Amino acid sequence: MLTFVTPDMLLPILALLVLSIDLFIESKNKTAILFDTAAAGVLLIIVLLFNLPHDQEFYYLTNYKVDGLRLLFKEIFAISLFFTILLGKGYARKNGNWRGILKYDSEFIALLIFCAFGMFCVVSAQELITLFIGLELATIPMYFLTAYYKKDQSSLEGAMKYIIMGSLTSALVLLGYSFWYGAVGCLRYEAILSFVQTNPDNPMFLAGAIFVFAAVCFKLAMVPFHMWAPDVYQAAPTPVTAFLSVASKSTAIAFVITLLYGPLAPIRHVFTYPLGILACITMTVGNLGAMRQYELRRFMAYSSIAQAGYIMLALVGNGKMAVPSIIYYLFIYLATNFCLFFIISVIGQKRPEEFASLRGLAKQSPALAGILVLCLFSLAGIPPLAGFTGKFMLFASAAEGGFYGLVIFAALNSTVSLYYYLLLIKEAYINKPEEDLESLEITFTQSFSIAILTLAVVILGLIPWFSSIITKIVG
Amino acid sequence: METFFTTNSWVILLMPFLVFLVNGLFLGKRSWRAAAYFAVACMSVAFFFAIKIAIGFFSHVHEHSYIKGWEIEWLRFASADILGFDLVANVGMLLDPISIMMLVVVTAISVLVNIYSIGYMKEDPSAGRFFSLLSLFSFSMLGLVSSTNIFQMFVFWELVGASSYLLIGFWYHKPSAVSASKKAFIVTRFADAFFLAGIIAVSYFTQTFDFIELNKLATVETLNRYAFLGFGTVNVLTVGTLLIFAGGWGKSAMFPLHIWLPDAMEGPTPVSSIIHSATMVVAGIYLTARLFPLFSHSPLTMDVVAYVGAFTALFAAVIAVTQNDIKRILAFSTLSQLGYMLFSLGVSKMVVEEGGAINSLGYSASMFHVFTHAAFKCMLFLIAGQVIHVVHSNNIWDMGGLRKKMPFTYVSCLIACLAIGGIWPFAGFWSKDEIILASLQGGHTVIFAIGLFVGGLTAFYMFRLFFVTFHGESRKELHHVHEDPFMTFPIVVLAIPSAVGGYFAKDLFHHAFVPNMPLHIHELSHPHWLPWVATSMGLSGIILAYFFFGRNKFTQASSIAKAMGPLHTVIENKFYFDEFYLFMTHKVAFRFVAAPIKWFDRKIVDGVMNLTGFLLHAGGAIVRFLQTGQVQMYLSVMILGLLYFCYRVF
Amino acid sequence: MENYTIIPFMTVLGILFVAGGMIGSWILSYSSPDNEHKNLVYECGELTIGQTHVRFKVGYYIFALIFMIFDVETLFLFPCVRIYNDVANGLIAGLSISTVMVELVVFFVILAFGLLYAWRKGVLKWS
């Protein structure tokens, strides 16, 4: 039965392995060895995860649960870890990026893997201590990773802000847990569940829940807890930004879902509607903010704030479709976002990662420009791309609960988002570059990843059985 | 019945798609020759599969049998657990007599046209693209004819339209080609809008897309009621079938949507041969035949089908007499023959005696004519391409005297003209004779008369083309006249079915191609004089053509043209239909519809949009302004969020 | 709710306690002008030598952190030891001695690896 937790156990082992390679092996192309080992290891973990039976429940030591829902989340984490490592490989080589070489490769990879391990713990935890340790393990490495360009003042500034605000959230979570513990007297989910069933409106418990949800909103960068996101996304190295925008967000969503559909299920309705309202505000602010940006990572920050809004809207529905639609969208969001970040990484080799650097892309590399258009259209939700199907299901989930007003609002927001996604396309296709451009180099890793992700962006929307499989597993 | 070949019938679709991908992405740019050979090889595999399926199917055919080669669920529009009923679009291959016949025809002609194009396109710099697009077309057409449901068919229908658009505009540097491709696309798309509306209306009431289901009697009963459909309360069966038929109306270029087909001749001649004569334009006929059991329960639809077909047959034949461009003559002749096929379906509903019983002869004759027409019309276009290649002109008056220089072509053309003219024992005779017989049996006297008369007219204008092109003296200095072997081979191959295909296939079509529905069972009259009359109409057409054009003196012809005066001019200008449409679109539609809409759009809609844009930008500026970069600020905003939660929860 | 009444009570008491101290000292104290002794860093104890705002060597912190490893180890070992007997007697469902041992070993290995890592990276050299 240990096979259920093998992937989880392999993660820290892989991290230690990467560090040991760094310690004990001397080689000229150590960077490549490190990244390749890590990628291979993560790929193995992904394969193991997909091979596990998704229709069974398994408890490890009574407080670590593995079932279909959790496996799906772990797959999302592991796949984003995989692509982050591949993305990072491009940044760790010479002339890999305009901002400089990413040094300390083994620590970079190991921190990412530990982060992913923390995320695994968050979804699987069945009691609050494990949950908290997982959450911290998923967060603390991000602080270091954000500050990875040590010499860059703005990078340090962003990381500093992240630490300060992140510590506050950790404090909030702990405060919330202590309220819960005070009310329930036990940290285990089943105890909390039975307490909530009998006392659904215990004020101490609700006060604790408020703090916990505030922390979740911080991790998800929901308005008004979103202020850190643009600064941090801009400060961090691009692979870290990608990981933050996909995996870290998914962790927060996993956190919410495991709580709302686990111990807090009886009082779910208390929180879903406020979260839905916040989701609508979030997507508006994200869309508005994204309109006036010129820096690609900052732009992606606002774009992902808006996307988080769409995702959280699905929870309002409170129905059968909520969780499957969110997980389905996360898969699509993963593919699209990583594809975009890979394109950004290609462009960012010799130029800053800005809008203006996209100019002339359509001439230089029509394929890359075409993929850029595909990804942006997918994010904007244009049929028949994957993003459309995903967004459609999210909105359908909210509509299932009868919140048509919110759905219409979200659909309008989605139209607004098309505007700024088109701005990028305009840069790539219409605006002329000011000087002659240096040619783009695409490494094998990059073209391979872009090819796979593009395929996913196109195909995930076209194969309907993908969503029905998820519904079958989760629903 | 299920064999290796039916279960693996997807190979037929895969092959052209593979060619499209490989040629489009890799081979086409490197070596067009490799692309061409690859296309021929893959299409031959598809043809082999089609032939194997056909042999397996027709060797022990039962009445109304069909096989679903394969079928998978594709799109679930509605599922029972949410909406209470299922509406699922599948993808699959339906193998029944008509689809198998079309599979064989399309794959065979694809192979031949690909071979022919090796010769025809060898001097074109973008030949690689040509072979890729041609395969895309084959893929779409094969998908269309083998669709198991109307939704899948619509998807492929549009793909066919798109690939036809790409191929007509293949020489996109020619303005005429570009405008012709646009015209074809817009006109057929206009018709397709009705088709889609029809699909929606019918599937809304029946909750199915599947052809087998739609053709059941129960479906007819479901549909045969009055309901409110957008513009008023109407009979769903009549309106639904008419709307669906409208799609075929446009695609098969029936009057008055025929205007795109003659212009489509701007494309390369192999394209005209495969798309605009043998395969794509029969899609409308095919659609009508596919849903024949459903259509036949609506008398109005059947009358529309019959009269639109008959009128187009006559109308196009009259125009063809006056045309001078060899490809345009063939285009109008195609229109005329398509008219035959269509009214043949329409006249299956008998007006005499039983009053509305279905005579299966009309249906089978129509499919029979699709088959024979594909052979001889494809061949005629290939001959036209061969001749144009030599003469470098489309005008038949620039040709002449090619008989000696191009012997193979000459003999083949004679066979094809005899076939289309309906002379015993060539292919066209058998199918056309059955069509005319069916209209006589059905009691449609007017249509019967038109059919007979157009038969003579067909022979006349075809032999006019034949004599002017091949006989007499050459009217132009020609150098290097030779027959390219790649181009001659398909012509000679097609001469075989054009000559004897009708005789050998007639029994098969009679027995196997029967609509799946209750039929008229009594023996119908089969007058012995009819074949004689039909043949003599054809022969008199030929003799008349010889009299006017066969003796290298055209004085009589021009004097008659002069005597006809204005009438001749009107016909020569195709009854000024293009001008009429131009007037309607440019003068009327633009001035009285588009201009006010433009005003409304510029002033009101744009004003609102600009205001929205301004507000959104202002919002963006506010968000940027709030993002001060101060952690104190960020944290205090977070406190606001906490307060909000407190407010909502307590 | 009776349990909660103590919270405002304690809040008021806390405020009074602090405010009372401050107000009391303000009333009781007398102010004297600044002098040399008053402005020393410490009003009592040793005099400092040189600047008090010195930067500590970063290695000092790293040493302190590595020392923390062993601290944490002890902290974690304590609960394990506490339940060890109960596990051995089968009083805790779902846990066996071997599981506890494996967990402990894993924990040691990770910590030891941290030490090894620091060692190999040359942190332990004080130069």
Image: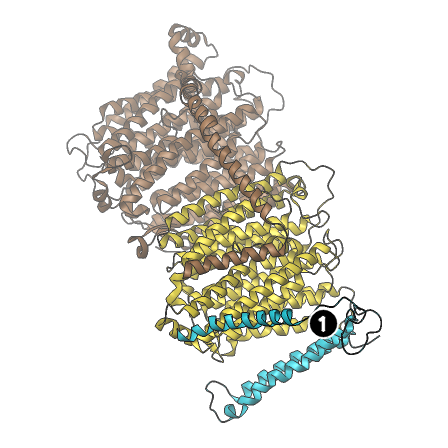
Chain colours: A yellow, B brown, C cyan
Q: Which residue is mark 1?
A: A21
| Residue B279 as seen in the image, left or right of residue A339 | left
Depth order, front residue of B342/B5: B342
Depth order, front residue of A46/A63: A63
| Residue B82 as seen in the image, left or right of residue B547 | left
Depth order, front residue of B60/A427: A427
Depth order, front residue of A337/A409: A409
Q: Position of residue B67 (x, y in %)?
A: 34, 51
Kindly identify the residue that appears in the image at 41 percent across and 6 percent down: B562
Kindly identify the residue that appears in the image at 29 percent across and 52 percent down: B85
Q: Is residue C22 above or below residue A224?
A: below
Label 1, secondary structure: give it: helix
Callout 1: 10 Å neighbours few (<14), some, many (20+)? some
Kindly identify the residue that appears in the image at 45 percent across and 66 percent down: A207
Q: Quadrant of the C terminus of chain A?
A: bottom left
Q: Position of residue B185 (x, y in %)?
A: 46, 31
- State the residue lying farthest toward the left: B353
What amino acid is labelled 1 in the image? Answer: Ile
Q: Position of residue A35 (x, y in %)?
A: 68, 64
Can residue B37 be spotted in the picture? no
Kindly identify the residue that appears in the image at 52 percent across and 48 percent down: A285
Q: Position of residue B555 (x, y in %)?
A: 45, 7
Can residue A205 be spotted in the picture? yes
Q: Chain of mark 1?
A: A
Count of numbered circles in the view: 1
